[in-house]
Image (cartoon, helix red, strand yellow):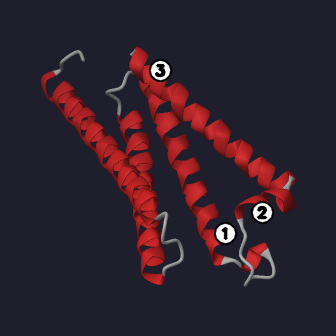
Amino acid sequence: MNKLKILFGLSTLLIAIQLFYFLSQLLFFESISALFIKDTEYTTVFQNPRWWIIEIIFTMILLSSCFIAIGLWSGIRNGLFTDKAVSYLRIGSRLLLGVGAGTLLISLLDAFNSVKENSFFMDFMVSVLIIMLGYLLLLFVDVIQKGIYFKKKNDLTI
């Protein structure tokens, strides 16, 4: 149970960092955009499709972190072998798989278009790690689901 609490703490820390990022985007938009976006072919930030893609990916990471945190909190409060915890964790893991697939696609497109030649390997590895994290979480959820099935079938106390 302590490991679940540590994982819950890490997921809430990730949520706090993401919320800080979104607030800083709203409050200090000009300075943040000047730091991260250095495209000369676009006149405004909102016309840059890369900015929108990055914001969508960060939003999906925030949503997956929220679902994972809610699932872990439900597991801490009511026991991990509940349908509610499993459903929240499954949604969070599927969102992580979507983020990983999206970032992998973006890094592959960048490699073919030679947009970021020197950082392709790093982007590719981060994308693969996000996909692996999503699959590991799905595997974890399936093990919990099997535990729920055996608990209901045999009336076991888990």
Distance between mark 1 and mark 2 Cα atoms = 9 Å
Q: Which residue is mark 3?
A: 5
Give the crowd class for mark 1: few <14, some 14-19, many >=20 residues within 10 Å: some
Q: Give percent across and percent down for residue 121.
A: 40, 61
Q: Residue at x 37, y 46 (%)?
A: 90
Looking at the image, which residue is at 18% across and 18% down?
156
- Cα separation, mark 1 vs mark 3, equals 34 Å
Residue type (three-letter) at the residue carrying disc 2: Ser
Disc 3 and disc 2 in contact, CB within 8 angstroms = no
Q: Is residue 9 above or below residue 42?
A: above
Up-down: is 112 above or below 99?
below
Residue located beneath label 1 in the image: 51
Is the C-beta separation of discs 1 and 2 under 8 Å? yes
Residue lying at 73% horizontally and 70% vertically, measured from the top left: 38
Task: Tell me if residue 83 comes above or below residue 26 in the rendering.
Answer: above
Q: Considering only order in the chain, which callout, 3 or 1, is on the residue closer to the N terminus?
A: 3
Q: Earlier in the sequence, mark 3 or mark 2?
A: 3
Does dot 1 land on a helix, a strand or a loop?
Answer: helix
Q: Is residue 115 above or below residue 87?
A: below
Asked whether, in this view, residue 55 is left or right of residue 86, the answer is right
Amino acid on which disc 1 is placed: Trp
Q: Residue at x 54, y 77 (%)?
A: 115
Question: Which residue is labeled 2 in the image?
Answer: 33
Q: Quadrant of residue 48?
A: bottom right
Point out residue 61 in the picture as x, y percentages from the top left corner: 54, 51
Which one is nearer the viewer's eye here, 114 or 71? Answer: 114
Residue 140 placement, left or right of 48: left
Report how far apart the C-alphas of labels 3 and 2 lie in the structure. 36 Å
**Labelled disc at residue 117:** none
Among the two numbered marks 1 and 2 on one chain, the one whose residue lies closer to the N terminus: 2
Say what secondary structure mark 2 lies in: helix
